[in-house]
Amino acid sequence: MVPGQLPYWKTRQRYLEGSLKPSEHLEEIFENIEKWEPVINAYISLRDKEELRKASKQADKAYMQGTARPLEGAFLAVKDNIMTIELPTTAGSLMLKGFMPGYEATVVKKLKNAGAIIIGKTNLDEYAMGSTTEYSAYGPTRNPLDPNRVPGGSSGGSGAVLAYGGADLALGSDTGGSVRLPAAYTGTIGLKPTYGTVSRYGLIPYANSLEQISPMARDLIDTALLFEYMAGKDPFDATSVDYDYTGLSERIREGLDPSTLRICLPQELFEHTDPVILKTLDRLYGKLESQGATVEEIKIPVLRHVLPAYYTIAFAEAASNLARYDGSLYPCRNQDAKSWEDNVIGARTSCFGREVKRRILMGVYVLSEGYRDAYYVAASKIRRLVKEAMLSATRHCVISSPASPVFPPRLSETLDDPLKMYALDRMTVTANLAGIPALVHPLAYTEQGLPIPVQWMAHPFGEELLFRVALLAEKLIQNS
């Protein structure tokens, strides 16, 4: 994280004390955007400044009158595959350039009702298909910690905006690590919630059975606060569940007794990881043990198969979901088409990017007659085994692992090698296949200023435990 950027909960304290107004804070954010955006390219679109100033004045008034809501004056960046009525929703694709939805995502509506102010829509890999935020029709996003490196993906725009101070809070989506990799690479926080705890209504789908709209922030308490107001049952999303997270951001401050903690380290998730990352994690686990926690290595052999299983399922669902883009309903059309078939071919050829085309083709292949059993059905069986193994393990311990096997790649390093890019997700896809919550946060920084993150996974609805463990880990490392 770029130094000097406060978490929202501390900014809110200043609002309440009267030492800062939301309208003044907005001008600070404008300065950050003007300074960083020409280089970083984290936003696809921004709201009109006068609109935002008007909204911030309303927030000023709410604090003066004592009627401020929990997220009053929090400036929110929204990943551009989440529907908003204030700004276009493009999914990072030419297919949806300028597309104005007729409705907004349930999550967006809930956060606005809590006082959040949308400031802009953030860049992403097209249709959330990527791990570096280089596969966007609107240009790559760079990492504010090192502009020669990627910020992770697909929610790289949200991570980058938080890192340089272009928003207080951010929304991403996580299909296989898409908020956790950006968090790992930009020194921010990313939570992939339990599947179903957050409504997906208004999220442009990539792989429905894997993805979740997810909170991102500069601070663990901020992330918990954002999640608290995102979560909940939604009649517009049949997969959503009713679980009460009220007061989460306050409860996690109470701390955790390390002697009650059992941490399991699956050896399969530590293989082929940079030694510098492993050294920092070893130091953390040693600190936890010295405080009375039980730390043990375990083996879950099926985890060696998670990456091909994940991508097979994701590609198959992507092929199904993107079949709706036939050049008739959305902005991209082939105006010279002489037939429906010409229109479909023309629109998809000119308006889908290379990586999206690759994933659609692979998805069609694994679902085709003669190959479905060998690929999609086999991957689904592996998914069931992964879920069973992770549910069994998380019943008695918190799972910990690296968040990424490597530090952020340099720009273009993986563009011509998709397998290398897919391998960046090796530590993160497990949580999506199992439907369990996973949290990534930075532990320390290298001499070059790159974050060294850790990932935690827990049993379904175990987000509170994840935050408590992460706060404990943060405290132990910072005090060492």
Image (cartoon, rainbow, N blue to C red):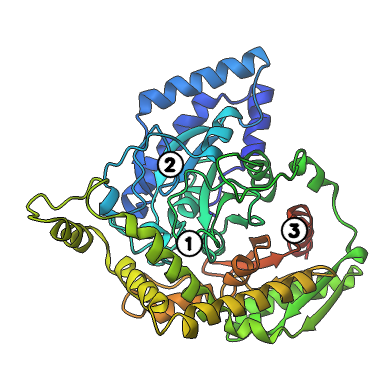
Distance of mark 1 from mark 2, alpha carbons? 17 Å
Q: Position of residue 91 (x, y in %)?
A: 37, 51
Distance of mark 2 from mark 3, alpha carbons? 29 Å
Residue 83: which disc? Answer: 2
Which numbered disc, 1 or 3, marks the residue that appears first in the sequence? 1
Please identify, in this view, whether the residue under mark 1 or under mark 3 is nearer the observer. 1
Q: Is residue 299 above or below residue 386?
A: below
Which quadrant of the figure contains the N terminus? bottom right
Q: Position of residue 209 (x, y in %)?
A: 55, 61
Lateral position of residue 156 relative to residue 258, left or right: left
Are the residues tagged 2 and 3 within 8 Å (C-beta)? no
Q: Position of residue 410 (x, y in %)?
A: 39, 72
Q: Which residue is mark 3?
A: 466
Question: Label 3 crowding class (10 Å Cα cut-off): few <14, some 14-19, many 20+?
Answer: many
* Residue found 79% across the figure and 48% down from its top: 252
* In the foreground, 336 or 107: 336
Residue type at mark 1: give it.
Answer: Ala
Please identify, in this view, whether the residue under mark 2 or under mark 3 is nearer the observer. 2
Q: Position of residue 290 (x, y in %)?
A: 88, 72
Residue 207: which disc? Answer: 1
For the residue labelled by badge 3, is the local secondary structure a helix, a strand or a loop? helix
Distance of mark 1 from mark 3, alpha carbons? 25 Å
Please identify, in this view, whether the residue under mark 1 or under mark 2 is nearer the observer. 1
